[in-house]
């Protein structure tokens, strides 16, 4: 390089330092984020820097520098084409074309035509290449919504305008001037080249940061969608499991209804077959009571109790026959005391036989009346108390000192209504897990081999009287026994 212009030499050194140092820093910063487009772009930056170094070292636009400038533009175009997902140019064809162009420029330089014909051809290729690159940068910036590539496009535009002017001047004058004439125009050209190189590197680095940010957002969006799909899948799985459970319950319910339907047929036959012998038994007991009457007119207590029990059985059969015929059982106003007075002798006998203590507690005001069918209410109570007896005689009751069943009558206010309640409480093991007596739930059982007919029949009868049958475990005492409540609406006083 000539030393005629030391100030220019200093400017050139600073320019080369920026052109080389800044790309290296950005390249190192992009470690781990370099794709094929980045490799091609920084290869173009490296070719451009090498061409500028050659221009500065030799003090003229040599054929080598001209070829490297053209290669830099070509690599930049291929980088943007890759960003647009265009088919790659075959590298063998590109390499052959570049080698042919380099040989042609070297031949022109040997013939002394480098700064005339060679200069004009080189500027033409650079102007056309920069225009194509500018178009690709605009498309990529729109596709990726990138501001960094707009900065690069500004740099290309800064180069394109003076190159276009120099090309026009070359056509008019038949060639170009020496690279370094020491004129202000040359100094401005060096500053512009340096500025453009900085814009190329910084702008493309910003584009890479934008791509990384978009990829991060895309990954987060994909993860969010995956989580949402997993939640939807789990929700669908839960819904499917609920449907399967409902299907299984319906299948079980249908099988139990079939069993109940078959039982209804057998019950009808049984009621018919028992009715005639029962009537005969009532007649025999009537004759026995007349024969065993003492002179004072008092009948035998044993015969009288037997006759009472048989009459109850006959009343029960009559009520069952009415229900099977589809008619409503007759209802009458009764009190809890009346019903319990009739049932307690039978229940006490069973309690003594099973070594269970049966106690009665009355908290209901006297005169409280409910309207029910007497026989059906007795069957409901008998069914509930029998279940309590069975729970106290199970395996879990072996360690208990004494079984206890407490019958309590009381009055409660709930749902805006007044109920007369019979509460049956035992100190047994309690109800099995999962059993719940609620309105609308049928065919539930506390026995492993039960059909649930007893509880369901009792619940159906109580609800037909606008009452409630509730069952739950006592969690307030140490025994944790079961509690069953029969709630019937009180008849208003007239």
Image (cartoon, rainbow, N blue to C red):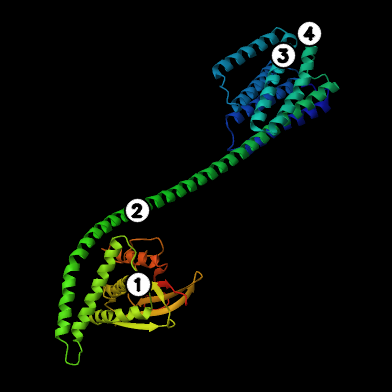
Residue at the (85%, 23%) spot, across then down: 184
Label number found at residue 430: 1
Residue 105, percent from left and from top:
67, 12
**Residue where numbered disc 2 is placed:** 250
| Rendered image quadrant of residue 439 | bottom left
Q: Earlier in the sequence, mark 1 or mark 3?
A: 3
- Tell me the SS state at disc 3: helix
State the quadrant of the N terminus: top right
Residue at the (74%, 27%) spot, across then down: 155
Q: Are marks 1 and 3 in contact (CB under 8 Å)?
A: no
The alpha-carbon separation of the residues under discs 4 and 2 comes to 99 Å
Give the class, few, some or many, for how many residues have Cα within 10 Å of label 4's Cα (few <14, many ≥20): some
Q: Residue furthest right?
A: 184
Q: Are marks 2 and 3 in contact (CB under 8 Å)?
A: no
Q: Nearer the viewer, residue 191 or 468?
A: 468
The alpha-carbon separation of the residues under discs 4 and 1 comes to 112 Å
Q: Are marks 4 and 1 in contact (CB under 8 Å)?
A: no
Q: As drawn, is 352 to the left or to the right of 113?
A: left
**Residue where numbered disc 3 is placed:** 124
Residue 187, percent from left and from top:
82, 24
Q: Earlier in the sequence, mark 4 or mark 1?
A: 4
For marks 4 and 2, give the one nearer the viewer.
2
């Amino acid at each position: 390089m000539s030393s005629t212009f030391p100030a220019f030499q200093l400017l050139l050194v600073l320019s080369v330092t920026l052109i080389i140092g800044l790309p290296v820093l950005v390249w190192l910063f992009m470690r781990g984020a370099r794709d094929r487009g980045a490799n091609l772009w920084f290869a173009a930056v490296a070719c451009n820097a090498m061409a500028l170094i050659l221009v500065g070292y030799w003090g003229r636009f040599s054929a080598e520098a001209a070829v490297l400038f053209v290669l830099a533009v070509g690599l930049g175009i291929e980088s943007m084409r890759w960003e647009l997902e265009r088919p790659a140019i075959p590298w063998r064809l590109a390499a052959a074309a570049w080698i042919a162009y380099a040989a042609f420029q070297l031949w022109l330089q040997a013939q002394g035509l480098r700064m005339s014909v060679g200069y004009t051809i080189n500027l033409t290729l650079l102007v056309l290449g920069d225009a194509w690159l500018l178009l690709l940068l605009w498309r990529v910036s729109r596709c990726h919504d990138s501001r960094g590539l707009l900065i690069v496009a500004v740099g290309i535009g800064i180069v394109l305008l003076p190159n276009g002017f120099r090309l026009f001047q070359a056509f008019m004058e038949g060639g170009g001037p020496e690279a370094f004439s020491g004129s202000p125009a040359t100094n401005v050209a060096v500053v512009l080249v340096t500025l453009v190189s900085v814009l190329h590197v910084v702008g493309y680095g910003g584009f890479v940061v934008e791509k990384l940010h978009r990829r991060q957002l895309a990954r987060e969006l994909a993860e969010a969608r995956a989580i949402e799909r997993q939640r939807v899948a789990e929700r669908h799985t839960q819904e499917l499991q609920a449907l399967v459970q409902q299907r299984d319950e319906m299948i079980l319910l249908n099988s139990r209804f079939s069993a109940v339907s078959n039982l209804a047929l057998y019950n009808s036959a049984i009621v018919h077959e028992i009715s005639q012998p029962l009537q005969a038994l009532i007649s025999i007991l009537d004759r026995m009571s007349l024969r065993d009457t003492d002179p004072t007119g008092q009948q035998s207590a044993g015969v009288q109790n037997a006759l009472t029990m048989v009459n109850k059985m006959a009343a029960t059969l009559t009520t069952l026959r009415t229900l099977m015929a589809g008619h409503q059982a007759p209802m009458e106003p009764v009190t809890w005391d009346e019903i319990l007075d009739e049932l307690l002798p039978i229940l006490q006998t069973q309690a003594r036989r099973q070594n269970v203590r049966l106690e009665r507690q009355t908290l209901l005001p006297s005169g409280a009346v409910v309207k029910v069918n007497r026989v059906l209410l007795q069957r409901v109570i008998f069914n509930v108390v029998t279940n309590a007896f069975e729970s106290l005689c199970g395996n879990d009751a072996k360690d208990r000192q004494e079984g206890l069943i407490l019958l309590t009558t009381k009055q409660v206010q709930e749902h805006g209504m007044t109920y007369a309640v019979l509460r049956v409480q035992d100190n047994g093991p309690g109800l099995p897990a999962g059993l719940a007596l609620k309105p609308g739930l049928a065919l539930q059982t506390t026995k492993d081999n039960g059909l649930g007919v007893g509880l369901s029949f009792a619940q159906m009868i109580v609800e037909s009287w606008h009452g409630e049958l509730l069952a739950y475990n006592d969690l307030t005492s140490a025994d944790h026994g079961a509690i069953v409540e029969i709630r019937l609406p009180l008849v208003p006083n007239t």
